[in-house]
Image (cartoon, grey):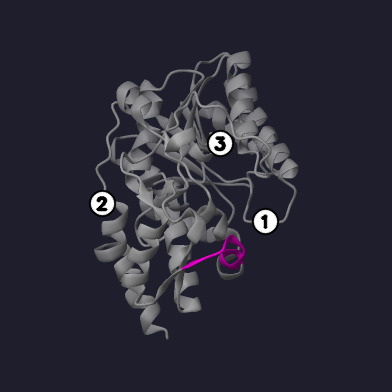
Amino acid sequence: MSGKRIFMTGASGYIGSRVTTLALAQGHTVHGLVRSDASASKLKSLGATPIHGNVSTDHAVLTREAAAADVVIHLADTLTNDFNQPYEKVLETEYKVLDAFFAALKGTEKPLITTSGSLVAAEEPDNKETDETTPYRENVHIQRHLGEKYALEQGEKHGVRVCVIRLPGFVYGLGASGMGMFANVFSGAGEAVYVADNAEGELANVYVDDAARMYLLAIEKGRAGQAYNCTNATYVAHRDWVEAMGKTLGVPVRGVSAEEAREKAGFLSLFLVVKNRATSTKARRELGWETEGVGLIEDLTSGSYAELAKTLKSKK
């Protein structure tokens, strides 16, 4: 794949900065949307070009930059950390962002790589794996599947090669992301908790650099109108990763009710009550993607989260 001009939302974020770094190493150029001077400085330090704008409101900027790009990667989260807003507002924002891209890309067959989650798939009975053909979850508050569905349907309508990367509930590594948030919460609470009724429930995960590589592989090999699970082949039960984190933090571990988990961990407790054994067989077959990063338990006990634990302990 020769060098491409990539326009990316979320380019300075947790996953986006890794996509940016790997893309630049492969000879691509990256133009990344940023809202702050700090994010602009971060992108410049990586070797990318910052484009100032707000993903939720500056739709003309999105259209202009998408038109100038060979590839668009949409990684920004339009939830924007406001977990109290109606999800209909989140979807409305997401649709407008996608429409801004389609206005520039229609009829070009240029790739638009966008983001969803493996949790859009309903749980299979008997703890079986889910894949991209599994029906969507029903009667859920966070209707992320509607954003995915809109992207794929509008891509077909406008002649745009849309691929959706379904990230798992846990993208981990570098001592950050959801696992980093859990570490801060458990450290502050003086104990690590899991939901006793879901102790053996498994949630798909992936190392951050492995996730970043899938976005770049999708540019070259992703098929139009397809979603790809971006998940490790190894599933980890909730009790196992919580016990590993508790050991690293040096705090006791306890099984609690879902209600107590909400009191302890707030919105993060949602990840303690779900199950998702999403297989990435399709991505491995079609994209040639393989996981290479450290496993979740190892990263928790002796990797980046062990380093984070040292920092948290020093603050007590």
As shown in the figure, which amino acid type bears the numbered disc 1? Asp
15 versus 306 height, above or below: above
For disc 1, the marked residue is 82
As shown in the figure, which amino acid type bears the numbered disc 2? Val
- 197 in magenta: no
Residue 91: horizontal and vertical position, in percent?
A: 69, 38
Q: Decide: marks 1, 3 in contact (CB < 8 A)? A: no
For disc 2, the marked residue is 294
Q: Decide: marks 1, 2 in contact (CB < 8 A)? A: no
Residue visible at 63% across and 44% down?
55
Q: Earlier in the sequence, mark 1 or mark 2?
A: 1
Disc 2, SS: loop
Residue 108: horizontal and vertical position, in percent?
A: 53, 15
Q: CA distance from mark 1 to mark 3?
A: 20 Å
Residue visible at 55% across and 59% down?
268
- 260 in magenta: yes
Residue 71 visible in image? yes
Residue visible at 50% across and 70% down?
185
Residue 11: horizontal and vertical position, in percent?
A: 47, 46
Residue 186: horizontal and vertical position, in percent?
A: 46, 72
Q: What segment carries the magenta color? A: 255-262
Quarter location, residue 192 = bottom left
Instruction: Give left or right: position of 32 versus 139.
Output: left
Q: CA distance from mark 3 to mark 2?
A: 26 Å
For disc 3, the marked residue is 120
Q: Quadrant of the N terminus?
A: top left
Q: Residues within 10 Å of mark 1 (few under 14, many from 20)?
A: few
Residue visible at 31% across and 39% down?
233
79 versus 183 height, above or below: above
